[in-house]
């Protein structure tokens, strides 16, 4: 173990020891760490080669934004052909409908033309769906934290993960509280948490209270959600409950 890892391990043990002592004395919470509200591994819906990587690590993205694309040249050509055939069939149907009353056009011819148009439009939608499957979009407003594949690299069904997006406009925080501290809390209630690093406080909503007391530690897991739309708080920051005023 190198000196940096050893130092970090000792520092973490000291923090946990101090907070454990505080919990025994004052019935407060052990330290917990903020986490992204969601961590999403964005995967390709098909196998292929990445044609475009449109974002970088650390870049903010919007829900629905295109992040990357697989090669779709062949499918795009097929789509263009299908669109042209559908347009031609639509024109043919309109002509038949226009001359229906003045020429010998049978109802069967009209029905066949309409059916053919439905088939052509279905083919267009099929190729559009294939292209969309090969297009990776962000499912949330978030930050790109990892890019696993880059342009010209291949993606397979066995290894579809292309990049990771985290949602941090809200943060999760799990604290392990004594039953005495946890029991008055109610789901949906608001409390204040304190960031250990700088003493900053923030409101947090009680999202979940475990119905089980851990037999080894005698604590109850309580999950809090911290609103972070302005990006004031970092994921990975150590926190505890702020003392009541």
Image: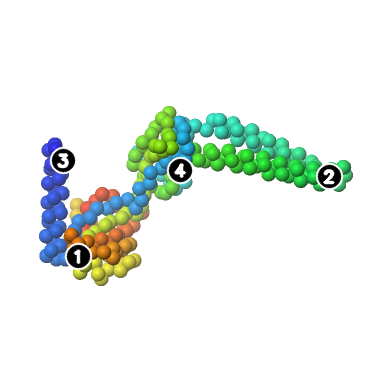
Q: Secondary structure at mark 3?
A: helix
Residue assigned mark 2: 106
Q: Label 4 near label 2: C-beta < 8 Å?
A: no
Q: Secondary structure at mark 1?
A: loop
Whether residue 150 can be seen here = yes
Give the spatial CA distance, label 2 vs label 4.
48 Å
Give the spatial CA distance, label 3 vs label 1.
31 Å
Q: Secondary structure at mark 4?
A: strand
Residue 156 locus on image (x, y percent): 43, 35
The mark nearer the N terminus, 3 or 4, is: 3
Residue 232 locus on image (x, y percent): 30, 52
Pick out the residue farthest to the bottom. Answer: 184
Please give the name of the residue rendered at 31% of the width and 58% of the height, measured from the top-left corner. Answer: 226
Which image quadrant is residue 103 in? Answer: top right
Residue assigned mark 1: 178
Please give the name of the residue rendered at 54% of the width and 30% of the height, measured from the top-left corner. Answer: 73
Q: Label 4 near label 3: C-beta < 8 Å?
A: no
Residue 71 locus on image (x, y percent): 49, 32
Residue assigned mark 4: 137
Disc nearest the viewer among 3 and 2: 2
As drawn, 166 above or below 206: above
Mark sitting on residue 5: 3
Disc nearest the viewer among 2 and 4: 2
Give the spatial CA distance, label 2 vs label 1.
82 Å
């Amino acid at each position: 173990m190198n000196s940096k890892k050893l130092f970090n391990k000792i520092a973490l043990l000291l923090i946990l020891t101090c907070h454990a002592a505080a919990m025994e004395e004052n019935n407060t919470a052990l330290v917990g760490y903020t986490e992204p509200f969601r961590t999403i591994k964005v995967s390709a819906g098909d196998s292929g080669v990445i044609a475009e990587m449109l974002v970088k690590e650390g870049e903010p993205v919007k829900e629905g934004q295109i992040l990357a694309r697989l090669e779709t040249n062949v499918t795009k050509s097929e789509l263009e052909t299908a669109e042209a055939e559908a347009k031609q069939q639509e024109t043919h149907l309109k002509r038949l409908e226009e001359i229906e009353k003045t020429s010998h056009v049978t109802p069967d011819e009209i029905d066949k033309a309409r059916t053919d148009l439905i088939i052509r439009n279905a083919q267009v939608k099929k190729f559009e769906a294939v292209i969309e499957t090969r297009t990776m979009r962000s499912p949330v407003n978030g930050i790109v934290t990892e890019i696993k594949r880059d342009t010209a690299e291949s993606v397979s069904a066995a290894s579809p993960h292309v990049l990771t997006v985290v949602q941090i406009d809200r943060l999760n925080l799990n604290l392990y509280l004594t039953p005495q501290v946890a029991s008055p809390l109610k789901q949906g209630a608001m409390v204040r948490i304190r960031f250990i690093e700088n003493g900053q406080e923030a409101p947090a909503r009680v999202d979940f209270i475990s119905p089980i007391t851990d037999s080894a530690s005698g604590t109850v897991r309580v999950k809090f959600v911290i609103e972070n739309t302005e990006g004031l708080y970092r994921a990975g920051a150590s926190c505890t409950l702020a003392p009541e005023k």
